């Protein structure tokens, strides 16, 4: 059932180890939280899966392939930073996505645009940060992918917008897909996860179901996170 | 919706309680179709698989049932619903009594307080 298989993954930037011997297998039909302090390797891991970073050691398989054209065609990646040009309007972005990806559903994108009350003809340079983040999320979620890789989809937006983003994510997420959701706003979103990965400076600290964590530790994921990473925070 | 949940109990169990309250209190009517898993997930902002698990639990309790072709429904069996209701009431009372004991009230004291409060509220 696992759609992502990672074995003994190592990644260095110069002499700096970012991911240290990571092994992980993830099943389809799940929403997985990828959690860890800043600089722990979350973004690097997502970039490797998205096929954007290639010089690593170890095996990374998505749907039976190491990152290539096939894996890019079945996975939808939301980067941490915006890549939309300032002149671009939502309609232009939709055109480009429809050109690039056969699984892009324009009707779905328009529907989400309405839900978010964005204007289809407003250039991104006139949009607030929150509006731009919404637009990017629309582009990513309007694809019918097997794998969604979301890097901080709610960084820097207000709680009401966060709530709207969660709504749309839950509404549009297809049940047989795998969604990996990197964030450090844990308390806000932990209830939407099946399971969570704690990544601590490139190493897997914990990979467990959210309800098992509550049963076993009598704590929320947020509380457990604060405990596990307490010493690294105080450094 | 967010503060419905406490942090140390499994989420699916908290959903079971929330759904049971709606059924026992009549907000969800006997015989009605249960909202879809996705709609429930969006409403309560929880994972769809967790909703599924909670509904399976309610099914085991006999409060909902699945019809193979047409979906999931609230039970029409009144006894089942009444039973769930008194189970919830017992729990509430046990919690209340525990709290009062913690605050140092005797049985006589707290029942007098309840009487007084009820009078004030005209109940």
Image (cartoon, helix red, strand yellow):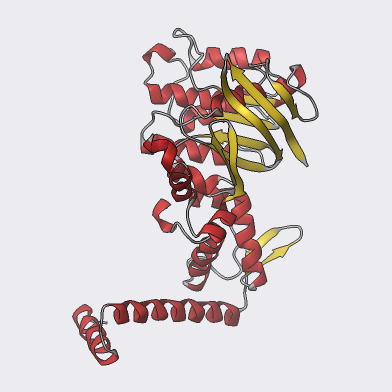
Q: Quadrant of residue B109?
A: bottom left
Which of the 4 image quarters holds residue B51? bottom right
**For residue A56, side relative to residue A216 (left or right):** right
Q: Quadrant of residue A157?
A: top left
Looking at the image, can residue A133 be seen?
Answer: yes
Up-down: is B71 above or below A189? below
Residue at 44% over, 36% down: A232
Q: Find residue A179 and report its horizontal and vertical position in percent.
A: 62, 36
The C terminus of chain A sits in image quarter: top left
Compare residues A123 and A129 and report the one nearer the observer: A129
Q: Give the position of the N terminus of chain A as an image quadrant.
A: top right
Q: Which residue is rendered at x = 38% and y = 18% of the image?
A: A127
Left/right of residue A234 with respect to residue B110 in the rendered view = right
Report whether residue A107 is seen. no
Residue A212 image offset from top left, x and y in percent: 59, 56
Residue A219 picture location, percent across and down: 48, 56
- Residue ID at (71%, 40%): A28
Query: Percent from the top left, x then y, of residue A140?
Result: 58, 25
């Amino acid at each position: 059932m696992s759609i992502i298989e990672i074995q003994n993954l190592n990644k260095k930037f110069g002499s700096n180890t970012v991911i240290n011997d990571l092994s992980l297998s993830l099943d389809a039909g799940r929403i997985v939280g990828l959690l860890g302090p800043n600089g722990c390797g979350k973004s690097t891991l997502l970039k490797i899966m998205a096929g954007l970073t290639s010089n690593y050691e170890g095996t990374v398989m998505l749907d039976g392939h190491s990152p290539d054209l096939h894996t890019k065609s079945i996975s939808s990646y939301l980067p941490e930073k915006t890549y939309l040009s300032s002149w671009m309007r939502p309609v232009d972005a939709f055109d480009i996505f429809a050109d690039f990806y056969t699984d892009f559903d324009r009707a779905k994108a328009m529907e989400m645009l309405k839900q978010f009350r964005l204007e289809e003809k407003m250039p991104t340079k006139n949009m607030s940060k929150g509006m731009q983040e919404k637009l990017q999320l629309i582009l990513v979620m309007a694809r019918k992918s097997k794998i969604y890789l979301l890097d901080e989809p709610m960084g820097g937006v207000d709680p009401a917008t966060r709530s709207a983003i969660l709504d749309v994510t839950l509404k549009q997420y297809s049940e047989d897909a795998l969604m990996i959701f990197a964030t450090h706003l844990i308390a806000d979103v932990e209830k939407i996860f099946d399971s969570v990965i704690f990544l601590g400076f490139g190493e897997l600290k914990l990979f467990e179901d959210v309800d098992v964590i509550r049963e076993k530790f009598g704590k929320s994921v947020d509380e457990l996170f604060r405990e596990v990473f307490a010493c690294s925070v105080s450094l | 919706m967010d503060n419905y949940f406490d942090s140390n109990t499994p989420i699916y169990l908290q959903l079971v309680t929330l759904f049971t309250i709606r059924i026992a209190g009549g907000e969800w009517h006997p015989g009605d179709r249960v909202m879809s898993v996705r709609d429930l997930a969006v409403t309560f902002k929880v994972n769809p698989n967790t909703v599924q698990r909670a509904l399976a639990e309610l099914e085991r309790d006999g409060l909902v049932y699945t019809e193979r072709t047409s979906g999931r429904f609230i039970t029409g069996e009144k006894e089942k619903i009444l039973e769930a209701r008194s189970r919830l009431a017992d729990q509430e009372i046990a919690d209340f009594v525990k709290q009062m004991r913690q605050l140092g009230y005797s049985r006589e004291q707290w029942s007098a307080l309840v009487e007084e409060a009820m009078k004030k509220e005209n109940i």
